[in-house]
Amino acid sequence: MGHTAAVAGASGYAGGELLRILLDHPDIEIGTLTAGGNAGTPLGAHHPHLIALADRVLADTSAATLAGHDIVFLALPHGQSAAIAAELGEDVLVVDLGADFRLTDADDWTAFYGSEHAGTWPYGLPELPGARTALTGARRIAVPGCYPTCGTIALFPAYAEALVEPEAVVVAVSGASGAGKAPKPTTVASEVMGSVSTYAVGGAHRHTPEFAQNLSVAAGARVTVSFTPMVAPMPRGILANCSAPLKPGITAADVRAAYQRHLADEPFAHLLPEGTWPSTGMTVGANHALVQVTVDEAAGRLVAVAAIDNLTKGTAGGAVQSTNIALGLPETTGLPAAGIAP
Amino acid sequence: MGHTAAVAGASGYAGGELLRILLDHPDIEIGTLTAGGNAGTPLGAHHPHLIALADRVLADTSAATLAGHDIVFLALPHGQSAAIAAELGEDVLVVDLGADFRLTDADDWTAFYGSEHAGTWPYGLPELPGARTALTGARRIAVPGCYPTCGTIALFPAYAEALVEPEAVVVAVSGASGAGKAPKPTTVASEVMGSVSTYAVGGAHRHTPEFAQNLSVAAGARVTVSFTPMVAPMPRGILANCSAPLKPGITAADVRAAYQRHLADEPFAHLLPEGTWPSTGMTVGANHALVQVTVDEAAGRLVAVAAIDNLTKGTAGGAVQSTNIALGLPETTGLPAAGIAP
Amino acid sequence: MGHTAAVAGASGYAGGELLRILLDHPDIEIGTLTAGGNAGTPLGAHHPHLIALADRVLADTSAATLAGHDIVFLALPHGQSAAIAAELGEDVLVVDLGADFRLTDADDWTAFYGSEHAGTWPYGLPELPGARTALTGARRIAVPGCYPTCGTIALFPAYAEALVEPEAVVVAVSGASGAGKAPKPTTVASEVMGSVSTYAVGGAHRHTPEFAQNLSVAAGARVTVSFTPMVAPMPRGILANCSAPLKPGITAADVRAAYQRHLADEPFAHLLPEGTWPSTGMTVGANHALVQVTVDEAAGRLVAVAAIDNLTKGTAGGAVQSTNIALGLPETTGLPAAGIAP
Amino acid sequence: MGHTAAVAGASGYAGGELLRILLDHPDIEIGTLTAGGNAGTPLGAHHPHLIALADRVLADTSAATLAGHDIVFLALPHGQSAAIAAELGEDVLVVDLGADFRLTDADDWTAFYGSEHAGTWPYGLPELPGARTALTGARRIAVPGCYPTCGTIALFPAYAEALVEPEAVVVAVSGASGAGKAPKPTTVASEVMGSVSTYAVGGAHRHTPEFAQNLSVAAGARVTVSFTPMVAPMPRGILANCSAPLKPGITAADVRAAYQRHLADEPFAHLLPEGTWPSTGMTVGANHALVQVTVDEAAGRLVAVAAIDNLTKGTAGGAVQSTNIALGLPETTGLPAAGIAP
């Protein structure tokens, strides 16, 4: 138990998933739990599945309640992390599960979030080329968005090896937990069950610039992304269907070899056997991303698909993975390697 | 009750949906119902929701049992329709809900279905330019596939008006009834619930050439389609996310005007108000296709989305719509205009 | 089109289902639609599946906006119907889909609803012995609760024929639409999907006294009911599992004969063939209740199960069925006889 | 790693869940995996969520392949366990997840399973009074059925303390994985989604005598059980709604005190805080049973509800819990204490 951790926003879905993982982490001890409107209530009222923490009472979210821990996880609404982080001291590892510090381009931030850019922190997607170096020893981590985590893992080998043109198309479907736990008209159960819906079409989703940023990093050149998100009637999971025009002369064998090269040593991103395509059900509760890729000869496109659990690899598990790197622990420490199925 | 109709394959999902619609059709009387392995059992054992037909006993599927009706609907496995149709006489209206007579290119047929091409019948997608003319008075109708029905309605205005380049990308998600009622490993409930999966990626799905055929008809030139299908945990519905590179100089206003022009007079294909995106839940049990379209400026693509009920507009309702045209009835006769929600 | 109808509470689930049915009713014309907080918005924003009414703008709910129709359907929160009904005139047929006028015992009302009893109207469950007489020509109708509709149909033959002791146990499961369309923590999709939950256990549910009232009417003596409700991850449907101790000497043959006698002539309550048990999926969108009954010899109990669609037979369809009786129309007029499956 | 374990029936749902748990068990090493029809295929083809075991090839199920391990888990169809166990030697711990050795009454076995009774092994429900003693040091364990696990935990305190009459009513709902992984008409996804169904009503379910046996053990006298099972549209979970007539003079305080007394020290059966009712969603992937109890004064009944994950506490987790006891390990070793939600 080398490290203590506080969790801000513990009553939400991201906070609950983080606690589920930390309960099994051998090197991190769970400290103070905080919430906004739910402060003063026991955690069991919000996460009855976490029996061991049921009687923990949620404190108010503030720098004061969060101070005194080695690690502070922030699962807060956008815009609240910068002020708290500023008060916590530079030796505290602050891991932001929100969006505030993901983007490198201040104009992108303002265009999509409508406020002033707070800055850029080391980006917590270890699979992205260069990311592990930036995360090692870091004391600030920006955890990626759930869609960009999934889609980037599906496409970065193609861009890192210049197999495709810089015009990606990503159509991804998410489980309903991606919309959070607060009741709203679009997440009423009867509206979601039995229906798949599309939203934020045409480049309007806030994860669009993050996608383009990641693929541009992989390519070493500007990549545009046409991104369409959907919601499906399931609690968890993201499936990202990604494609881009193949560059002239690239063969299916080139593609498979490139994906094998980039994914063979990844602890949590796996290229499936040929012919097996990922489904979100293979990933529930696990920290792994499952990937498959092929070439559509008639259409001249590379098509790659990845599946993750949006709350595990896509949020809380990804956060702990990057935390392990920052702390110098083995990257897989405490992370669920097997999913729950069916 | 001007017309009598037999239904072959009545115990399956397509057959059941057809019977649900025909029960409310004022000009068609339900005659003989047939099945393969289920012959000899009452319909109520297979479709307990169709109380009025519960005691009807299923006959064997053969030209003999189907003869003597004005209309014969064939909801059979691929490859069985040609022989039966040949025996039924040219004055009988034969409506094939299977794939046998959809494709115009015999090589496409053989490449995707592995057998000899049976021929081409008038294509039952009234919204496709030219289709109503071919259907009027027809005595053979090939009902389109469910995915091509949805995706073609989403994209045909863009190709009919030459707004986009001939390289479409379609990522569509279907409810599980699209896989039929026969038990198989991929449709076991616990495997489907809580999971979205991708299959037949890279142009392998049999609906791929039908998509390309339809969009090429609309464009008057060859269009390629990169098609990726998914299955979502819901019984019914298809949502098709479609995009293509915009041609130079085409504006969002051009796009909207084109879609309004092509869809304004359609009885069952509706352009939604701006800002409203279709979901499959809006279409359950209805014969309508709901469409929305936008322009992704940053990615330079037109993005169109359509939703249908795969069993209604995508199969049985579409079949009755074309039947109405063939018989000279008002196109909307007997068809459900309102869906069931939630 | 002999009758005009206004619908108050048109933007909710009960209102939407009522409109779906009225769109197909040959003798009722849809007039003014009203809402509370949604007044001023188009119906299409709330019920996009009802394309034909998409542009209808919702008026405020008041006696003034509802006046001038032959029929007024009230789908309002509890406690609002009495004042409006008082202003509408005694010649207007007022059909209350809420609870205000269901109970005959004022003390029961106050104990379960906490306010003063507004009165008792003819009870709109035609299957209950004596109900059709009271409904014929009525100008006020209290539509039953969804659970009591289902459970009463399952058990009334047993009590009408004195087959069982007056101590019923009812454990029923409902789809999530029973909780209404307003967002609340218990109906957030991710909380509902993948989970069945029990609530209001131990006699706390407001439908408990209504159950006891109905079964007491059937028995001609006081019956107690132990009622436990659950919510399952589906939009629609109620399945009621009902049992009671068999009286001495009653045989399985007695039981079956009694159920056949009471249900044989019912247009919307059907005893299934022996060996077939009801599921909610057999009833979606239909006005029918499906019933099965057996005897558990070892436990000495009669066990009856009924399934309905909570929004159709359990609310809006039941309302129209009673309306037809009140108006002297054939009882089945305009009502969906076939469900949608799968 | 003191113990090696073989798993027979590894490609099914029970086998897969067992492997998920054993992967995290510090004192059990996974040895040979076997299957029937799936022998010769890799485990990854059946359980893609278990990445670490994906390449393990399934052997044929036989005493020869299973021999040489300290523990043999049998997840086989009914009737196959006795012959294999007989060949394995008395020092091997054989844990049967099937039904063969659960019942003590040979007539009950023959009445419900139609074959000759194979015998009775120590019953693996540690919560049942007396069970831990029988399990300590045992070399044969009969893992209970999933429904009896859930319902017995809900009711045993009431019977152990003689609070209720010996006539229990249990209405329980299960997720679809309870029906196994083999495709069959009743588990086709489109038939299950959107529908709750009842089956084996009137005492016909094979778990009925097991229920009666357990409650009779708790009561020290014969108890009858009216048991009605349902299937709900979710992969996992059982919710058991149980009630029985209160004995004269028993108060709500008596009931609560008794449940607290019996459950306070249980590691995996928890009485929830008053007012909180269990849902299956609180238990997914965890080995805990969550319980609540109340008194229905008007109906004169005790009502108790319990929720479990049918595959974890109801099958594989329960098996490992009893295995731990048999081996002298701490009872909670390797078992998931936290569920996955949402």
Image (tube, coloured by chain):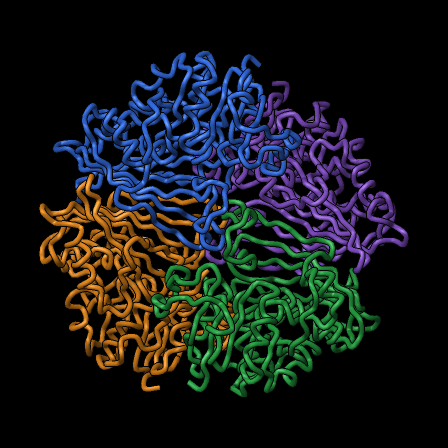
Chain colours: A purple, B green, C orange, D blue
Q: How many numbered marks, from 0 up?
A: 0
Q: Is residue B115 left or right of residue C275?
A: right
User: Which quarter of the rendered picture does the N terminus of chain C lie within?
Assistant: bottom left
Q: Residue at x 15, y 58 (%)?
A: C105
With respect to residue B154, does B41 lie above or below?
Answer: above
Is residue D271 visible in this depiction of the protein?
A: yes
- Examine the rendered structure and indicate whether residue B236 appears above or below residue B29: above
Identify the residue shown where x is 28% and y is 47%.
C171
Residue C112, image x, y percentages: 23, 52
Q: Position of residue D330 (x, y in %)?
A: 46, 15
Residue A179 percent location from the top left of the image: 57, 50
Q: In the rendered view, does D237 fall on the left or right side of B271?
A: left
- Can you say whether D196 is above or below B266 in the image? above
**In x, y percent, where is residue A145?**
67, 45
Q: In the shown orientation, is residue B108 left or right of residue B87?
A: right
Q: Residue at x 49, y 66 (%)?
A: B9
